[in-house]
Image (tube, helix red, strand yellow):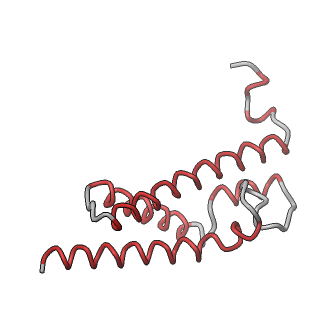
Amino acid sequence: MHKGCELNSMSSNNKLILIKTLHTIIWVFFNAVIFYMAYAVIVNKIDKYIWMGIGCIVLEWIVLLIFKWRCPLTLIARKYSDSTKDNFDIYLPNWLAKNNKPIYITIFIVIVSGLILRILNYRL
């Protein structure tokens, strides 16, 4: 491995950029999961992917609970920034970074409620 490719030789700013990029990619992934789950409930396509989506979201919540409701990437990014903004560790508008959890918890509850209704209607 070349010395220039080592994480330890990167500047703090470059490390923060790497963390922000990774954090944003993970955020986009979870948005795709949530979007698919909403789509599946709306069109009544209850398949293995909706259950995998729920599993991904539950796994994310377990990680957040372990880290006291903070993303581990936020904790790592904190080493490289003194910013007090909510979006210092992710490429999102500050208002969205600040309200991300309540927004997505609400969306998830709506999706799961719709899923329960679909399952109950299917069985009736």
Q: List x then y, in percent, for residue 33.
A: 45, 56
The relative height of residue 54 versus residue 122 in the rendered view (above or below) is above
- Residue 107 falls left or right of residue 76: left
Q: Residue furthest front?
A: 43
Q: Residue at x 53, y 58 (%)?
A: 31
Q: How many marks?
A: 0
Q: Is residue 85 above or below residue 7?
A: below
The image position of residue 60, as x and y in percent, is 49, 62
Q: Nearer the viewer, residue 28 or 83?
A: 28
Tell whether 120 sits left or right of 87. Answer: left
Residue drawn at x 41%, y 65% as measured from the top left: 38
Asked if 99 appears above or below 21 in the picture, the reply is below
> Residue 92 lies in what quarter of the image?
bottom right
Where residue 118 sits: x, y (%)?
A: 25, 74
Residue shown at the point (70%, 66%) measured from the top left: 97
- Residue positioned 62% across, 62% down in the render: 71
Q: If the image is split into quadrants, where does the C terminus sit?
A: bottom left
In this image, 13 relative to 101: left or right?
right
Task: Return the residue found at the far top.
Answer: 2
Q: Quadrant of the N terminus?
A: top right
